[in-house]
Structure formats: C-alpha cells, structure tokens
Amino acid sequence: MKFTKWVLSKGINTVAKRLEVRPNTVQFWLYGYRTPRKMKIKKLLTMGKGSFSFEDIIKETTRKQ
C-alpha cells in the first residue's frame, strides 16, 4: 500500500490542494471508487519522487470487489 501510505503521510488535504482537486476525490481514490486520470497520475509520480509506482497507483485505486 505504498501509494496509500504516501498520501496519508502527506495528508489528503495537502495532496488534493497540490493536485487542484477536492479532498473527497483523493478519498475516492483511496477507497477504490475512482482511479486518477492520466495527468494526475503523472503529477502524483512526480510529487512522490519514487515512493510508489504507476502500478501501485492503479492497483490501489482500482475498484475493490
């Protein structure tokens, strides 16, 4: 859960503000209700500086059954 841990360590509100999205959008990603769009993933990867990968984001934000 590298991506989730990173978001929580930075703070949902902080991540949302830097990505110019609402905090509930970030929460939806963490709950698996939504997956970030391509441009947000690119920005997240830049912000994360290697803390997580593209695959981590997809795996952790894909709808959980």
Image (cartoon, helix red, strand yellow):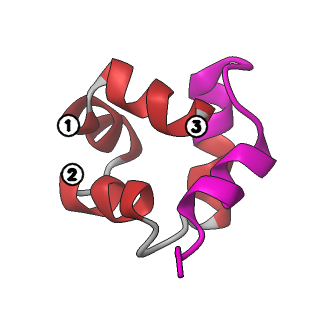
Query: Left or right: where does residue 4 sit relative to residue 8?
Result: right
Q: Going by the image, does 10 lie left or right of 11?
A: right
Q: Where is residue 33 in the image (x, y as percent from the top left)?
A: 41, 75
Q: How far apart are marks 3 and 1 (CA)?
A: 19 Å
SS category of the residue bearing label 3: loop
The answer to whether mark 3 and mark 2 are in CB contact below 8 A is no
Whole-angstrom CA distance, mark 2 to mark 1, is: 5 Å
User: In this rendering, which labeled residue sits more in front, label 3 or label 1?
Assistant: 3
Badge 3 is on which residue?
A: 1
Looking at the image, residue 42 lies above or below residue 33: above
Q: In this view, does 25 lie to the left or right of 48?
A: left
Q: Please, which residue is most extreme toward the front here?
A: 65
Q: In which quarter of the image is the N terminus?
A: top right
- Which of the 4 image quarters holds residue 45? top right
Instruction: Indicate which disc residue 23 carries.
Output: 2
Decide: is 47 above or below 61. above
Under mark 1, the amino acid is: Asn
Picture coordinates of residue 38, whole percent (x, y): 68, 63
Q: Where is residue 42 in the image (x, y as percent from the top left)?
A: 69, 46
Magenta includes 57?
A: yes
Helix or strand or loop: what does disc 2 sit on? Answer: helix
Q: What label sits on residue 60 in the rendered view? A: none
The magenta stretch is 44-65
Say which residue appears at 35% left-offset and 35% top-offset.
Answer: 15
Does 38 sit above or below residue 55? below
Which residue lies under the disc numbered 1? 13
